[in-house]
Every structure is written in structure tokens, then in C-alpha cells.
């Protein structure tokens, strides 16, 4: 299969393949992390630490154990697929905004002496991106998808509030805010009518 074959696939197939590869990568990294006695977890976001800046890139790929990764797997598959299904380019751009802006905000604001990791910042970002994006683009089908996503996953938005020890509510909050920003940043431009 060459690049031409891949580009000829329908967008939903590329979205499914892309998110499946991403989630498989998360599981492969966790296998390596467990084999390395969780030493990779130190590569998460360490707020306001020069070394912790690299964590902005690494944190969504790392998890605090099998339970953490398992809890993120189904939402990542569903919300990641739906995000890429809005258009591969748009979905990747939205993901990059959520990943980088959410991570940078955690690095700037979260409490010191902590390490933040996991794909849940992305998941919260994808959730809010999908919830807002249809309204931003004024597309009824995408509004319905966004409302459906809120019905199914909206309850997790309580995770943006502090409360559960050991859970990075900052990662959830800033991922969610970055998802809203991404919806506006990658919106379809409507020409003058």
C-alpha cells in the first residue's frame, strides 16, 4: 500500500485507522513503561520546570497504570474518531491545539511538585471541541453529534473541578478550554453571501 492508496480511502476510514493507531501506541508505550518500572511517567508535565516542558509533548502518551489507560481507551477511540471525522486536517489541527495549549496551560498554572500525565486532557478537549464545533460552523448534523456526545460523555465534565486526589483536574480543565478554542480556530470560513 502506498500513499496514494491511503489518500484514496474515505475520511471516516482514515479517522478510524488514525485513532486506532494512536490508541495502540498508548498501549505499547504503557507496556514499555511497566517493563521499565514506570520510569517513563517522570516524563509527564512538571509545572514550571524547564525539564517539565518536554512533558507537554509526552504527557498525553503516558498513563499511571493499566487502569488509567483502560479508563481512557474507549473515550479516546470514540471522541478521537469523531474529531478526525470532522475532517482529517481539521481534526489533526484541533488535536494539536488541544495537546499543546492544554499542556502549556497545565505547565503554567498547576501546582508545583506534581507530575501530570494521561490522555484525558485530549479527551476533555475532544469532547468540548465536538460539543461546540457544530454551533461554530452552523451545521445541524454536527450540532446533533455534539449534543449526542454531551449526552453520552457530558457527565465527565465534572472532572474539571478539583476533588479527586491524584487526578489532574487542571489537565481536564485546560484540555476542555483548549477544545473550545480549537473549535473556533479550525472553524470553516464562510464567505460573504
Image (cartoon, helix red, strand yellow):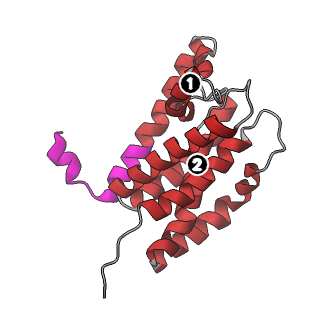
Task: Please name the residue shown 34% across and 77% down the image.
Answer: 190
User: Left of 139 or right of it: where is 113?
Assistant: right
User: Left of 102 or right of it: where is 156?
Assistant: right
Are the two marked residues, 2 and 1, in contact with CB atoms closer than 8 angstroms?
A: no
**Residue hosting label 2:** 123
Q: Hey, which quadrant is residue 8 in on the image?
A: bottom left
- Local secondary structure at mark 2: helix
Is residue 183 located in the magenta-colored stretch of the structure? no
**Which disc, if any, is residue 30?**
1
Residue 172 image offset from top left, x and y in percent: 67, 46
Q: Nearer the viewer, residue 22 or 162?
A: 162
Is residue 4 located in the magenta-colored stretch of the structure? yes
- Local secondary structure at mark 1: helix
Tell me if I can see residue 147 in this picture.
Answer: yes
Give the total of numbered labels: 2
Task: Please name the residue shown 73% across and 59% down the image.
Answer: 155
Give above or below for 66 relative to 120.
above
User: Left of 137 or right of it: where is 181?
Assistant: right
Residue 107 image offset from top left, x and y in percent: 62, 35
Q: Main secondary structure of the magenta part?
A: helix
Disc 2/disc 1 C-alpha distance (Å): 18 Å
Magenta residue span: 1-19
The answer to which of marks 2 and 1 sits earlier in the sequence is 1
Amino acid at each position: 500500500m502506498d500513499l496514494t492508496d491511503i489518500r484514496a480511502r474515505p475520511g471516516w476510514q482514515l479517522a478510524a485507522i488514525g485513532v486506532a493507531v494512536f490508541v495502540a501506541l498508548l498501549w505499547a508505550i504503557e507496556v514499555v513503561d511497566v517493563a521499565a518500572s514506570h520510569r517513563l511517567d517522570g516524563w509527564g508535565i512538571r509545572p514550571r520546570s524547564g525539564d517539565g516542558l518536554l512533558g507537554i509533548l509526552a504527557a498525553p502518551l503516558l498513563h499511571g497504570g493499566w487502569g488509567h489507560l483502560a479508563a481512557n481507551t474507549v473515550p479516546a477511540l470514540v471522541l478521537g474518531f469523531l474529531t478526525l471525522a470532522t475532517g482529517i486536517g481539521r481534526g489533526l489541527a484541533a488535536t494539536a491545539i488541544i495537546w499543546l495549549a492544554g499542556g502549556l496551560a497545565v505547565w503554567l498554572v498547576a501546582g508545583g511538585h506534581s507530575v501530570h500525565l494521561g490522555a484525558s486532557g485530549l479527551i476533555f478537549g475532544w469532547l468540548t471541541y465536538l460539543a461546540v464545533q457544530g454551533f461554530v460552523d452552523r451545521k445541524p448534523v454536527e450540532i446533533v453529534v455534539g449534543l449526542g456526545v454531551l449526552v453520552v460523555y457530558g457527565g465527565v465534565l465534572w472532572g474539571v473541578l478539583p476533588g479527586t486526589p491524584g487526578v489532574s483536574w487542571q489537565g481536564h480543565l485546560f484540555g476542555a478550554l483548549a477544545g473550545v478554542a480549537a473549535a473556533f480556530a479550525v472553524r470553516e470560513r464562510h464567505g460573504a453571501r
